[in-house]
Image: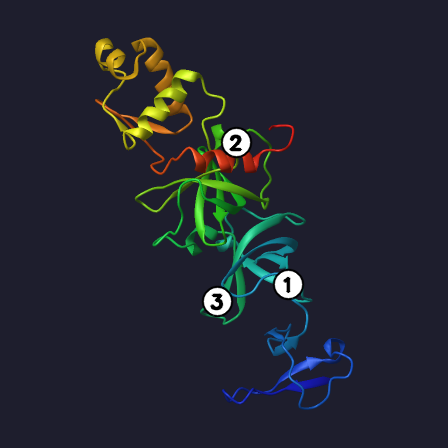
Amino acid sequence: MGAYLGPDGSQPEPSVLLPNKYIPEGLKEGDELEVFVYLDHEDRPVATTLIPLAKVDTFAVLKVNYMNRFGAFLDWGFEKDLFVPYSEQLERMEIGESYLVHVHMDDQSQRLVASSKVAQYTQKENIDLKPFQEVEVVIYDATELGFRVLIDNRYDGLAYRNEVFREVEFGERCRAFIKQVRPDGKVDVSLGPIGIDGIEPNAQRIWEILNKKGGVLMLSDASAPEAIEDTVQMSKKAFKKAIGSLYKKRLINIETDHIKALIQEYTPEGPKHLRDKGKTKNEK
C-alpha cells in the first residue's frame, strides 16, 4: 500500500501511511521525508508529498469544484476537496468561481475547513503599516463604499470605489499603497500610487503649506477672505476650490476652523518616489 512514516522521536505520534503514488524513487527505510498530513475520504490520516495550495491558518484564492446541500468544496491541490459550509460563505459560492478563503481547523470535527468571511481572521491590533507604504493585496468583496482587500495576508483594508478607475476582479492579487490606519484599526488603501499629481496648482500649494505646518492649517471654508489671503495668498473662492479638490482625494478633512491632513507623514521625496515607481514608461 505504501510506506509508513514514523515520528521523529520528539513526539509519540502513530505511523501515517504514505501511498505508493507519492513515494519518491529510491526511498528506503530510515530516510527522512517532508510531507503534508491530512484526512482522507475515510477520515484517516494520510501523508502526501504534494504541495497544498493552502495550509492551516493561511489565506488563499481557491476555485470551487462542486456544491452540495452542505456547502462548497474547493480545489486545494488534493484528491479530497476543502469544505466551506454555507455558514462560512461571505456570499453564496458558485461552481467554477474562485474566492479568497481562510483555512483553519474546525474545533468540533478536527478537520481542515475554509471560510470566505476572511475579515474575522485578520489582525485587528498592532497594525504595522505606515502611510505611503507599498503592500500586496487581494480583492475579495465589494461594498457601497468600495472594495475590501486583504493586505499582506494579515490585515483587512478598503479601497474606496470613487478612487478606483479600472475594472477589478474578486481574487485579484495586486499591489497597493497605504493611505492611513484609522484609530479603530481599519485601513484605507489606494490601488494606485498615492500623490497629488493631477490636481490644480492652488490645491498643490495648499498641500505643501499644510505639510510645512505639521498637517494642520488654521483656515477653513468659513474663514474670512482677508485671513485666507494673508496666509496662503489666494482668494477665498480659489481657496475653497483647492481644499475641495484635496478633500475629494481624501487627503484632508475640513473642520469648522481648520483643515487637517489625513496623511501625516508626507515628505516630498517619499510620495514622489512611490508615484514614479508605480508608473509605466508611457505614464512617466
Q: Which residue is mark 3?
A: 106
Q: Nearer the viewer, mark 2 or mark 1?
A: 2
Q: Position of residue 181 (x, y in %)?
A: 36, 43
Secondary element at image label 2: loop
Residue 127 shown left or right of residue 150 in the figure: left
Q: Look at label 2 and name its amino acid.
A: Val
Circle number at residue 81 = 1
Q: Position of residue 110 (x, y in %)?
A: 50, 72
Secondary element at image label 1: loop
Q: Residues within 10 Å of mark 3 (few under 14, many from 20)?
A: few
The residue lying toward the viewer, choosing from 241 and 2, is 241
Q: Which residue is mark 2?
A: 164
Mark before the other along the chain sequence, 2 or 1: 1
Query: Can see residue 193?
Result: no
Secondary element at image label 3: loop
Q: Residue furthest right?
A: 25
Res 83 → quadrant? bottom right
Mark before the other along the chain sequence, 1 or 3: 1
Q: Look at label 3 and name its amino acid.
A: Asp
Query: What residue is at 76 percent from the left and 76 percent from the top?
Result: 21
- C-alpha distance separating marks 1 and 3: 15 Å
- C-alpha distance separating marks 2 and 1: 35 Å
The residue lying toward the viewer, choosing from 277 and 118, is 277
Q: Position of residue 86 (x, y in %)?
A: 52, 54
Circle number at residue 132 = none
Residue 272 lies, with reference to residue 108, above or below; the image says: above
Q: Residues within 10 Å of mark 1 (few under 14, many from 20)?
A: some
